[in-house]
Each structure stands twice: as structure tokens, then as C-alpha cells.
Amino acid sequence: MRFCASGTTACAAKLFLKYTASLRQRWSMAIKKEKSAGKDSKTTERMDIRTIASAANVSIATVSRVMNNVSTVNPQMAKRVWEVIDKLDYFPNTQARALVSGRSRLFGLIVSEITNPFFPELIQGFEDIAVEHGYEILVSSTNDDPKRMSHCIRRMIERKVEGVAIMTFGIEEPLLDQLAKRKVPLVFIDIGPKRPGISILKVDYHHGIRQGVQHLAAMGHRDISFISGPRTLHSAQSRRVAFTTSLKECGIAPESTWIVEGNHTMEGGIACMECLLTAKKRPTAVMCSNDMTAIGVLHKLYRAGFRVPDDFSVIGFDDIHIAGVTTPPLTTVQMSRFELARAAVMALRAHVEQHNNPAPKREYDIGTDLIVRESTGFPRGAMTPRKPKSKSAAPR
């Protein structure tokens, strides 16, 4: 018994020593791994333009020119630099680059209402085109509030944007003086101050709206209503004038009671259509200043038991993405967000990169076109077959 006990004790001791040795080995490996990871982390943190230049076997100036997309760099050399940047997973410090170069390569974009699908589509196009040319964007929404507009402009100034596109379809000239004083290039839609460094995107509202009115008139509509946007917006005024002018061109006298003011929202479209339905004489077709208003009109007509286009024809304006999937799909005047975004970025670049374009354009034309879908048709009764005339007795 004594021998067995002592043997068991010796065996346990050996196992304990073996276990502690294993723990020491694991602990040592963990420490080495941690040190190695810390070393790699420090290397990554210390990685800068010099690291890239050394790995690519080029000068620091060459790396800088490559990252700033300077066209004079040898293409093969630029490719080698980008390959090293990708391999080392290097992310340049844009703030440091801005301090050194004196350029933020940042464009501001101010929109009026981020909840309107028109503006996210515009923002997406603006960002895609800006990034393609080496710029980042800073987006702000005003919600048609002058105080928010002032806050938006302050953010732009603090971030040292190189140019700002004011895509609010309105103008707050007193607030924009802060940007103008700092000689920040600006882009407006429709109208803007006549100052240096300012470009205007001129939208041809009349062409698309005239197509819409002619489309309705050709199908026999003569009782045509128009739901406008807020009178405070220059764009809303322009669309209203385009509508009344187009009616007169088709020989149709505008009916003042059928021209109502909306607010470019779906709720506004519902409210305006309610007013039109209570009129003694109802129109047979409704044109709207934007698609959200038209969608509100479609909703109200559906709830009221009317069919589109059998009872009413409806036309929108903008051609937002969801206009093609409403019930029925919406006939609308297309104003390309991509063209607006492209022209805005082009205008800002022309002002910022004046070494390439010493005389930036003042105006950029934006076209409009009618997109015919299923929300427009002949007015009720227009296609009713005529009763055959009774046969009269043949003359003797």
C-alpha cells in the first residue's frame, strides 16, 4: 500500500509539472503574438505617404500626385502606386492632405426636403459624379426652414467646402451672403444672384408641361386643372406659368378655380383633390407640380371611388422612381436628377479648377420631357359610340 501511494504521488507530481510547463509555453506564445500584433498595429498606425513611396520605389511627390489624380503622372507608375496602396490597405488622411494642399476637395449640397424621393435620387447622382472626379460631399437638408438653412451654411463654412450646390428650388439670398463673402462658388436652380462665382441650372419647365397639356388636349380634354407648388418657390411659379401658357397655345381658356396651390407633398395632393371634387363643375384631368402631389391625387381618387384614367386623367412632374410603379403607373414630366447632378458638379468644378476653364459658364440648360404611362386617357364619354341616325324615307 505504501509503495502504491508513493507511486501515485510521484505520478501526480509529474503530471503537475507537465501541466505547468504547458501553461508557461502557452503564456509565452500569447505574449509573443500580442507583441507581434502590437508591432503590426504600430506599423499600420505609422504608415503614411513615405511608406507607400518606399514600397512603390517612387518619390513622395509622385505618390501625392497619384492620389490627387494628377493627369501628368506616368500611367504605369500610377498603377504601381495604386497596387501598393491596395496591398498595404492604406487609407490617406484627408484632413492632413487638406492642410498641406490647402484644398478640402469637398462639395456641399443643400436640399429642401430629404423625405421627398426626388432629393435622395438627386443626392445619389451628385455623390456618384463628385466621387468619380475625386471629391467628397457634405449634404444638408433645410426642411424649408430659414434657421436650418443658416445652420446648413455654417456647417459648410466650418468644413471649408470648395463649392456648394443649392438644390432647394428657392433662394435665401441674405443667408447666402456668408458663402459669397468667402468667395465660395455656388450653383442654383432657376435663379440666383448675379455675382462672380455663381452658376445657374436653367430648367425648361415649359417644354415638358406643354407636352403634357398637348397630350391631354389631343385626347379630348378641355377641363384641365393644375395643382401648383408653394407660391414662394420660383420653380412652382414657373411651372404654373408654363401650364397656363400651354393651355392658351392649345386654344383652352384657363379656369382660375381649377388652379389650386399645393405644397409639393402627398398630403397636399390629397387636400387639393378634395377641393376639386367639391366644385360644382369638376375637371376631367389634373396636372400636378410634382409627383408626390400626383400620388396624393391618385390616393384621394381611389378612396373616393373614382378610377384613373376612366374618370380622371392625372399627370405628375419629376418622374421619381416610384412613379413607374403606382397604380396605375403615373404619366409624368421627366426632369432628370442625373442631369441636374452632372451639371451641378460640372459647374462647381469649372469654378474650382479654373486653370482648366478660365471662363466658367453662367448657365446650364436642363431639359424636360413627357413620359406617358397609364394614368392618362380619354375623358369619360369621349369614346362612346354615336347612335346611328334613323333611316328616313327615301324621297319620291
Image: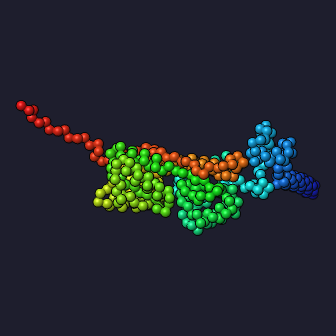
Q: Quick one: 281 or 116, which is closer to the camera?
A: 281
Q: Position of residue 78 (x, y in %)?
A: 78, 41
**Residue found at x 77% / y 41%:** 72
Q: Position of residue 189 (x, y in %)?
A: 55, 55
**Residue found at x 62% / y 58%:** 195
Q: Position of residue 3 (x, y in %)?
A: 93, 55
Give the colouring mode of the picture.
Answer: rainbow
Residue 74 can be seen, yes or no:
yes
Q: Quick one: 211 or 42, which is closer to the camera?
A: 211
**Residue found at x 58% / y 63%:** 173
- 147 to 90, vertically: above or below: below
Left or right: where 10 falls relative to 385: right
Q: Quadrant of residue 34?
A: bottom right
Q: Position of residue 218 (x, y in %)?
A: 35, 43
**Residue found at x 45% / y 45%:** 370
Left or right: where 90 falls relative to 162: right
Q: Quadrant of residue 46?
A: bottom right
- 302 to 384, vertically: above or below: below
- Residue lying at the far top in this picture: please name it: 396
Quarter containing the C terminus: top left
